[in-house]
Image: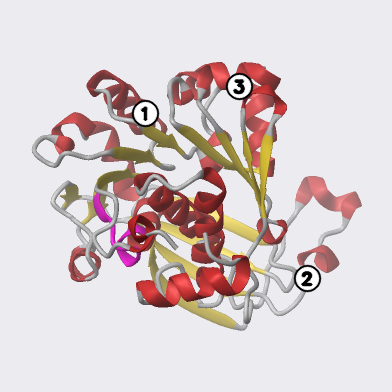
Amino acid sequence: MTSSLRTPSGGGPVLVTGSLAFDQIMDFPGFFKDHILPEKIHMISISFLVSEFRKQRGGCSGNIAYTLALLGERPRILASAGSDFGEYRTWLAEHGVDVDAIATHDDEVTASCFITTDKADNQITGFYVGAMKRARELSLAAADDGFGAQLAVVAPDDPEAMMRHCREAREIGLPVVFDPSFQVIAMDGESLREAARGARAVVVNDYEFAVFREKTGVEGDALFDLAQLWVVTYGEEGSKVLLPGGESLEVPAAKAREVVDPTGAGDAYRGGFVAGLLRGADLGVCGRMGSIAAVYAVESYGTQSHAYLRDEFWHRYEENFGTP
């Protein structure tokens, strides 16, 4: 294993933009499909009795930055939070995340996500934006002044903020990993094309990838006129790194010792993948780093409840994939 991958200091500073939120996570000890009648789909009114409830620290920027910090990177979050964010801010700082660019608003509460998961890992989610709507007021260029980021991750946030951050990153010549995730629903085709334009990579799951292509009308090799590469995740089936000319790298999923909660696995994958990019790893290794980071997340309840030493991470990598 190369020393550049295992170095404790990581690959350099990275800006992470995106939501900060509190996740209200609930477990339903059954299957949604058993309680949804197809002939009544137009008038659903269902209450699920949940067996577990926990309030967790979350949000895409918090989750991704947490994984990056675990892997020895130096992430700075650019995001908006509310008057209830104090304990969360302290916790992030204590775990190696730079919080200087997080704006807090006394007249708002931090965004909140309400997630119910059934036994098949299907999820029903509601999201209250709260202070997240103020993220459009934040400048990526200002956040990078004196920080010297090597890369910016633009993760789901207020859509106007995502557009602004991608535009400012291009203006200052900062490579971007664009992660539209669930905001492919809120953004129109023109906005998605503009945000992805010039990105080092776009990371989506297979459903989001289909929505992106449908909304933008961009298919095949034309995708690489927008971004250098595309990373598509498939949950327990792994992921693919798509390259120009129809080439792709198949990335296997890591083996979970126990599946406790899938929430946050996608953000953890992105953190692992980006850590590989920062260290100059080949794309297959980047994807496998994402797989290992994701499997740690699914083995714990909540999106930032897991932890590992970097030596433990690389031992787990070798157990699953051998020496990179």
Give the quadrant of the N terminus: bottom left
**Distance of mark 2 from mark 3, alpha carbons?**
37 Å
- Front residue of 118 and 258: 258
**Distance of mark 1 from mark 3, alpha carbons?**
22 Å
To which quarter of the image does residue 59 belong?
A: bottom left
| Mark toward the viewer: 2 or 3 | 3
Q: Position of residue 172 (x, y in %)?
A: 23, 23
Vertical side of 79 occupied by 62: above or below: below
Q: Position of residue 91 (x, y in %)?
A: 23, 70
Q: Residue at x 57, y 48 (%)?
A: 284
Q: Left of 316 or right of it: where is 98?
A: left
Vertical side of 72 occupied by 206: above or below: above
Amino acid under disc 1? Glu
Q: Residue at x 17, y 37 (%)?
A: 144
Q: Tell me which numbered mark, 1 or 2, is placed earlier along the sequence.
A: 2
Q: Residue at x 26, y 19 (%)?
A: 171
Q: Which SS class for mark 3? A: helix
- The residue pinned by badge 1 equals 160
- The residue pinned by badge 3 equals 223
- The residue pinned by badge 2 equals 31
Magenta region: 68-76
- Residues packed near mark 3 inside 10 Å, few (<14), some (14 to 19) or many (20 plus): many
Work out which residue is located at the far left of the displayed protein and give it. 146
Q: Left of 226 or right of it: where is 42?
A: right
Q: Check if residue 35 falls in the magenta segment.
A: no
Is residue 307 in view from this perspective? no
Q: Which SS class for mark 2? A: loop
Vertical side of 225 occupied by 6: above or below: below
To which quarter of the image does residue 67 belong?
A: bottom left
Q: Tell me which numbered mark, 1 or 3, is placed earlier along the sequence.
A: 1
Q: Which SS class for mark 1? A: helix
